[in-house]
Image (cartoon, helix red, strand yellow):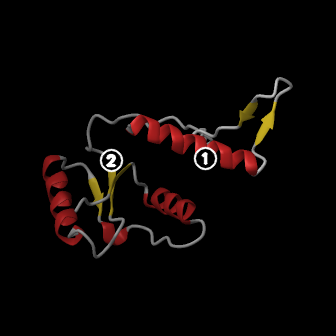
Amino acid sequence: MRKSIRLLMILAVLMSMSATGDAAPTPTGKTIYDVVSPVGRITAERKPLAASINTFNGKTIGLWWELPGKFAGDVTFPKLAELIEKQFPQAKVIPYTDMPDAKGRGREEKIIAGLKKLGVDVLISGNGG
């Protein structure tokens, strides 16, 4: 029963498409419908991932809190910095409070430029809630 209801719904959609001009009859009288995948096509340019690192020692690590005021990042990020500095004494940790302030148009470019200016090698981003 459910399959026949689904089939009727699909047919109703297809019939409404033909009424709007989204279908074309063939010489044999059959109608061909244009169907668009709900998944869509991948149009973003794929970029290679950055290489993994072996250690934080000798690296500058930025802590990025995407949503200040949410999810207790003011508690977790200082503790994370403390643990990184304890385990990797030659690492330099830049707290979230010193990260670039980037809002509005061109936000991504501002963030990247700010991180480069700070010499960030590794960025730890987010704070799950």
Q: Is residue 125 left or right of residue 81?
A: right
**Residue at figure coordinates x 43%, y 55% from the top left:** 119
Which disc number belongs to residue 13? 1
Amino acid type, residue under disc 1 in the picture: Val
Q: Secondary structure at mark 1?
A: helix
Distance in Å between CA atoms under marks 2 and 1: 57 Å
Residue at the top extreme of this rendering? 28
Q: Quadrant of residue 3?
A: top left
Residue at the bottom extreme of this rendering? 69
Residue 29 vertical placement versus 98 (above, below): above
**Mark 2 neighbour density, 10 Å: few (under 14) some (14–19) many (20 or more):** some
**Mark 1 neighbour density, 10 Å: few (under 14) some (14–19) many (20 or more):** few
Q: Secondary structure at mark 2?
A: loop
Mark before the other along the chain sequence, 2 or 1: 1
User: At which x and y percent is residue 122?
Assistant: 36, 49
CB atoms of marks 2 and 1 within 8 Å: no
User: At which x and y percent is residue 87?
Assistant: 14, 47
Front position among marks 2 and 1: 1
Q: Quadrant of residue 75?
A: bottom left
The quadrant in which the C terminus is found is bottom left
Residue indicated by mark 2: 59
Residue 83 or 21: which is nearer the viewer? 21
Residue 88 vertical placement versus 55 (above, below): below
**Residue at figure coordinates x 51%, y 57% from the top left:** 112
Amino acid type, residue under disc 2 in the picture: Lys
Residue 100 vertical placement versus 19 (above, below): below
**Residue at figure coordinates x 45%, y 72% from the top left:** 101
* Residue 38 in view of the camera: no
